[in-house]
Image (tube, helix red, strand yellow):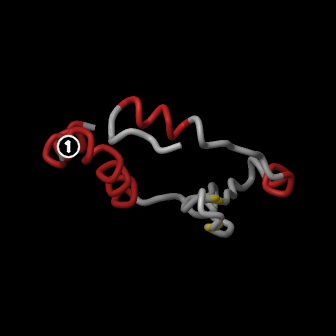
Amino acid sequence: MACPPASGQAKRCLLDRVSTEVADGFDAEFPAKSPAEVIVDTTAGEVFRSGRIEALWEPPDTLPSDADLQGKFLWLTGPIIGKGKANDLIEKI
C-alpha cells in the first residue's frame, strides 16, 4: 500500500507502518546508557540496520559543550522556524 504524497495523511500512513520494540539487552543498560538500533524492513524484502547507536552525551562522563548544544538546537529547530529565528532564540536563551 503506497502512501499519498507528502501531507498530514502521508505522515499518518507512515506511522501506521512503524513499530517500536524494547530490546532486553538495551533495556538492561538503561538509565546508565541509552543504546538504540534502527531496523528498516522494506516491502521489497530488504533489511537495513543501523547497528548499535549510543547517545552522543552519556552523563556524567561525556557532557556536551555549549557549542554542541547550540549545534543540536539549530539542527532541530532550523528546518522548522528558519535558521535566523533559531539563532535569535539562541541569543535570548
- Residue nearest the observer in this picture, 43 or 67: 43
Q: Nearer the viewer, residue 64 or 86?
A: 86
Q: Secondary structure at mark 1?
A: helix
Give coordinates of residue 25: x percent, y percent.
Answer: 85, 57
- Position of 50 with respect to 30 (left or right) is left
Residue 65 vs 83, above or below: the answer is: below
Tell whether 67 sits left or right of 18: left
* Residue 38: percent from left, percent from top: 63, 58
Seen at 39% across and 60% down, the residue is 68
- In this rendering, the answer to whether 14 lies above or below 29 is above
Q: Quick one: quadrant of the C terminus?
A: top left
Labels in figure, total: 1
Q: Position of residue 56 (x, y in %)?
A: 54, 62
User: Could you tell whether 24 is left or right of 59 in the image?
Assistant: right
Residue pushed farthest front? 1
- The picture quadrant where one finds residue 48 is bottom right
> How far across and how far down the image is residue 49, in percent?
64, 67
Q: Which residue in the structure is indicated by mark 1? A: 91
Specify the quadrant of the image occupied by residue 90.
top left
Q: Nearer the viewer, residue 60 or 6?
A: 6
Q: Amino acid at mark 1?
A: Glu
Name the residue: 13% across, 46% down: 84
The residue at 61%/43% (across/down) is: 18
Residue at x 33%, y 41% (from the top left corner): 6
Farthest residue toward the left? 84
Of residue 14 and residue 28, the one placed in the foreground of this image is 14
Judge left or right: residue 64 versus residue 66.
Answer: right
- Local packing at callout 1 (Cα closer than 10 Å; few below 14, some 14-19, many 20+) is few
